[in-house]
Image (cartoon, rainbow, N blue to C red):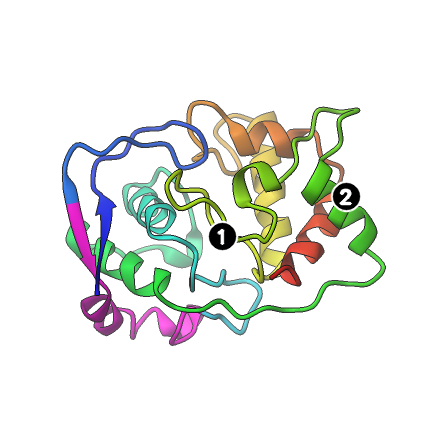
Amino acid sequence: MKHFIVTTLVALGLTGWVNAQALEGDAATGQAQAVVCGACHGADGNSAAAAFPKLAGLGEKYLLKQLLDIQSGARTVPTMAGQLDGKSTQNLADLAAYYASQTRTVGQANAELVELGEKIYRAGNAEVGIAACTACHSPTGKGNYPAGFPALGGQHADYIEAQLKAFREGANEPGKGRDNDGETRVMRDVAARMSDIEMRSVASYIQGLH
């Protein structure tokens, strides 16, 4: 099955882009290309190791944006160095279509962190200006496909926490951490206001969210 995605991206919001030309990603073709990726991310995009994100069900728009950013160097991921060299935009679109078509597995939340994690995810923290995660990622963690906001439910807690810390570093020290959330700095502004325990708790909650 082919899925509609876009090729031209600009920095706007979390995923930030406009489409100048439509491109179709083919999941079957992407599956053939994903064989090598399976070593880290799992054959169906459900990685066994928390150091590697689950790509299954992440969303085509978000996946393509991240693949293009990693390829161009806009997002630095040391473990991905050289992995996307020589791949065309069509190749990346096919990979995005394949992983987006897969079903995400779900983990378990730490019972001791659920209360705070759920509070942050569903209500944020108005006292310090932390927005609720549901606003972009949906109450069930399925994300927002039209906007390109990724599905988070079931993602490894350690990976989510690491990305939140990277966004916080990107907010506090320009040029460091992670800053490919676009001109509006959505994730950097949120993460900059979060404490370590809030990050750990919401990450754990997300791991069990489905």
The magenta region covers 23-45
Between residues 163 and 59, which one lies in front from this camera angle?
59
Q: Quadrant of the C terminus?
A: bottom right
Estimate the x, y position of residue 204 in percent, counting from the top left.
Answer: 70, 57
Using the rendered image of the protein, determine whether residue 21 is visible from the camera's viewpoint: yes
Say if 2 sits above or below 19 in the image. Answer: below
Tell me where residue 91 appears, x and y as whole percent.
Answer: 18, 57
- Please tell me which residue is depicted at 44% across the width and 29% down the height of the picture: 13
Q: Secondary structure at mark 2?
A: helix
- Label 1 close to label 2 by CB (< 8 Å): no
| Residue that badge 2 annotates | 119
Does residue 83 appear in this view?
no
Say left or right for 204 vs 8.
right
**Is 168 within the magenta?**
no
Question: Against 44, is 5 above or below?
Answer: above
The residue that label 1 is drawn on is 151
